[in-house]
Image (spheres, helix red, strand yellow):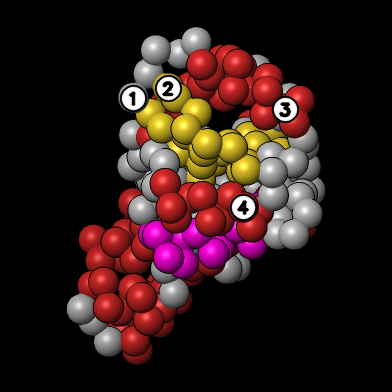
């Protein structure tokens, strides 16, 4: 059973999503939150399998809540479900560590499929989000060394350089070199674009 925390400030949205998920044999909404602060607190207290997170809420928005949750619980799997697709929302949400990004215009079936995929470690991006960043057809990540691929996955999970160094038992200087190589080989400008590349290519498992 996939245990779900639903974080959204609109009651009708929560009621609608919960009603649909309740008929799924493999899903259960174990709690609801009406703002990011409440979502953060319930996420850490209940440790759900999946967190469905709205972005624009009072007290604490979804991006901040995502950052705070993952800062204390790196294994959390967060799906952004929002009406917003502008760069000021998409990139910060992915950079904060959200695993998947959906729009509220997604069908109920698409949301349940995304929940299942995210639960099994596969990030899901709304088509319109994926199309925001275009990449060459060649598989640039095939040029990465094994260590650089490890670094890319940790970048995509929101790890800082120091956290990557601690995780891989290498020096901070070595991490910085690997990160520079990853960005160069993937032909991207920053860690956020590298993260989007990793999602787009299905490298997050």
Of callouts 1 and 3, the N-terminal one: 1
Q: Name the residue under label 4.
A: 38
| Most foreground residue, 77 or 132 | 77
What percent of the width, then of the height, locates residue 78?
51, 45
Q: What element carries label 3?
A: helix
How many C-alpha atoms fall within 10 Å of the one at disc 1: few (<14), some, or many (≥20)? few
- Tally of numbered discs: 4
CA gap between label 4 and label 2 equals 22 Å
Q: Mark 2 points at which residue?
A: 27
- Taking the image as shown, residue 144 lies to the left or right of residue 87, namely left
Q: Name the residue under label 1.
A: 1
Of badges 4 and 2, nearer the viewer stands 4
Q: What element carries label 1?
A: loop
CA gap between label 1 and label 3 equals 22 Å
What percent of the width, then of the height, locates residue 116?
41, 26
- The residues colored magenta run 62-74
Asked if marks 1 and 2 touch (Cβ < 8 Å), the reply is: yes
Q: In which quarter of the image is residue 26?
A: top left
Q: Quadrant of residue 13?
A: top right
Q: What element carries label 2?
A: strand
How many C-alpha atoms fall within 10 Å of the one at disc 2: few (<14), some, or many (≥20)? many
């Amino acid at each position: 059973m996939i245990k779900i925390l639903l974080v959204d400030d609109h009651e009708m949205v929560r009621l609608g999503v919960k009603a649909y998920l309740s008929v799924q044999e493999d899903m259960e909404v174990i709690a609801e939150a009406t703002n990011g602060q409440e979502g953060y607190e319930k996420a850490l207290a209940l440790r759900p399998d999946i967190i469905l997170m709205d972005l624009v809420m009072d007290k604490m928005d979804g991006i901040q809540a995502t950052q705070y949750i993952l800062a204390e619980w790196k294994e959390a799997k967060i799906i952004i479900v929002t009406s917003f697709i502008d760069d000021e929302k998409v990139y910060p949400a992915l950079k904060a560590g959200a695993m998947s990004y959906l729009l509220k215009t997604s069908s109920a079936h698409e949301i349940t499929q995304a929940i299942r995929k995210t639960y099994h470690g596969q990030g899901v991006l709304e088509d319109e989000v994926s199309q925001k960043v275009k990449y060459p057809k060649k598989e640039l990540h095939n040029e990465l060394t094994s260590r650089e691929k490890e670094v890319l996955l940790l970048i995509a999970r929101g790890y800082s350089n120091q956290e990557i160094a601690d995780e891989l038992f290498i020096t901070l200087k070595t991490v910085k070199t690997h990160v520079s190589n990853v960005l160069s080989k993937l032909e991207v400008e920053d860690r956020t674009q590298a993260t989007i590349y990793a999602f787009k290519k299905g490298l997050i498992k």
